């Protein structure tokens, strides 16, 4: 069950299932690139006080189960995670650009859903089993 967090004047438990894809659904998130992405996202989330509960990729997309503070604005969080991760991945792995026309790593769209204590275990299991299709 997700943790209830006490802030100054408020109590919250906010979790989201976030998914986004590589542009053109290219098979990019493999081996060192996959690990680099996970490291980058972990660092970004730590810097922005976002907790990653679960994270997994499947070659052309990534799933995250994240916990946020009420002050976070979802579109800004997504823009930050996608934008910074793309820049850092291109810097670390310039070979990715050859697979993508126009130099954009991520598809501009994303999926996000709230997660309740009733669905948390289902979402966790789904994310953990991404590679077992």
Image: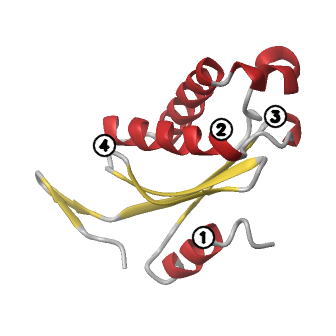
Q: Secondary structure at mark 3?
A: helix
Q: Out of 89 and 77, give the one closest to the viewer.
A: 89
Whole-Å distance between the Cαs marked 4 and 3? Answer: 27 Å
81 vs 15, left or right, is right
Callout 2: helix, strand or loop?
A: helix
Q: In the rendering, at what x and y percent does residue 106 appear?
A: 73, 33
Percent position (x, y) of residue 119? 54, 79
**Image quarter of residue 94:** top right
Q: Is residue 100 visible?
A: no
| Mark 1 surroundings within 10 Å by alpha-carbon count, few (fewer than 14), some (14 through 19), many (20 or more) | some
| Marked residue nearer the N-terminal end (4 or 1) | 4
Q: Residue at x 54, y 73 (%)?
A: 124
State how far apart marks 1 and 2 are (Cα): 19 Å
Q: Are marks 4 and 1 in contact (CB under 8 Å)?
A: no
Q: Which residue is mark 3?
A: 23
Q: Which is more toward the observer, 19 or 60?
A: 60
User: In the rendered view, would you say 50 is above or below 66?
Assistant: above
Q: Which labelled disc corresponds to residue 128?
A: 1
Residue 49 is tagged as: 4
Q: Quick one: SS at disc 4?
A: loop
Judge whether 14 appears above or below 71 on screen.
below
Q: Quadrant of the N terminus?
A: bottom left
Left or right, 113 with respect to 99, comes to left
């Amino acid at each position: 069950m997700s943790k209830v967090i006490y802030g100054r004047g408020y109590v919250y438990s906010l979790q989201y299932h976030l998914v986004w894809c590589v542009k053109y659904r290219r098979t990019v998130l493999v081996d060192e690139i996959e690990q680099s992405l996970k490291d980058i996202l972990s660092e970004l989330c730590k810097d922005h006080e976002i907790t990653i509960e679960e994270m997994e990729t499947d070659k052309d997309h990534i799933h995250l189960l994240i916990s946020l503070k009420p002050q976070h604005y979802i579109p800004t969080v997504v823009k930050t995670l996608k934008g910074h991760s793309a820049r850092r991945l291109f810097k670390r792995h310039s070979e990715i650009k050859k697979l993508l026309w126009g130099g954009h790593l991520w598809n501009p769209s994303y999926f996000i859903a709230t997660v309740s204590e009733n669905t948390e275990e289902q979402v966790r299991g789904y994310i953990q089993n991404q590679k077992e299709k």
